[in-house]
Amino acid sequence: GSCGWLLPSSPDEGPFADASRGEAGESVSMVAVAGMSVPVAEYATYGTPELAHNAVKALGPRDKAVLLANHGILAGAADLMNAFNIIEEVEYCSKIIASRAIGTPVVLSEDEMEVMLERFKSYGQRKKRS
């Protein structure tokens, strides 16, 4: 099977990786594609096995992305298109979190995020099987 992992260079989630702060599911769409939160992996020099080990260690069983401390985001999915979608949603949530400088955003409760995860299992149009 195919698999897609992306490590883009993006200014949106970089400050959160630099501050070693994870991101909570601030949007319904992020919960659907990336999970309830994005963990932060401990810092290690780029290109080293230690950085890869730290990324894997930080990823939980339901996580699809990880912030690499002082580097950026790493996201994985069944294919590159879905990995890119995860990154877009995390970047969107990064902007929501950054908006806290001008006010307090509404954060979904963990219970509500669980409801959203369940509902997204049947969300949208489905291909009819013949």
Image (tube, grey):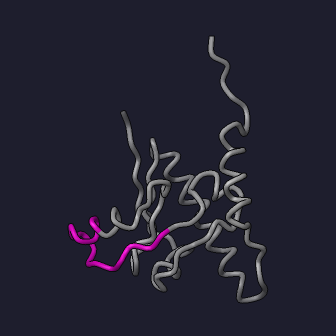
- Asked whether, in this view, residue 122 is left or right of residue 48, the answer is right
Determine whether 14 is above or below 58 in the image: below
Q: Residue furthest top?
A: 130
Q: Say which quadrant the N terminus sits in.
A: top left
Quarter of image, res 90 = bottom right
The residue located at (42%, 63%) in the rendering is 74
Q: Position of residue 7 (x, y in %)?
A: 40, 62
Q: Residue furthest front?
A: 111
Between 123 and 10, the one lying in front of the other is 123
The residue located at (46%, 47%) in the rendering is 77
Q: Residue furthest bottom?
A: 101
- Asked whether, in this view, residue 40 is left or right of residue 43, the answer is right
The residue located at (50%, 70%) in the rendering is 10
The residue located at (73%, 67%) in the rendering is 108
In this picture, which residue range is highlighted in magenta?
39-53
Q: Position of residue 26 (x, y in %)?
A: 69, 68
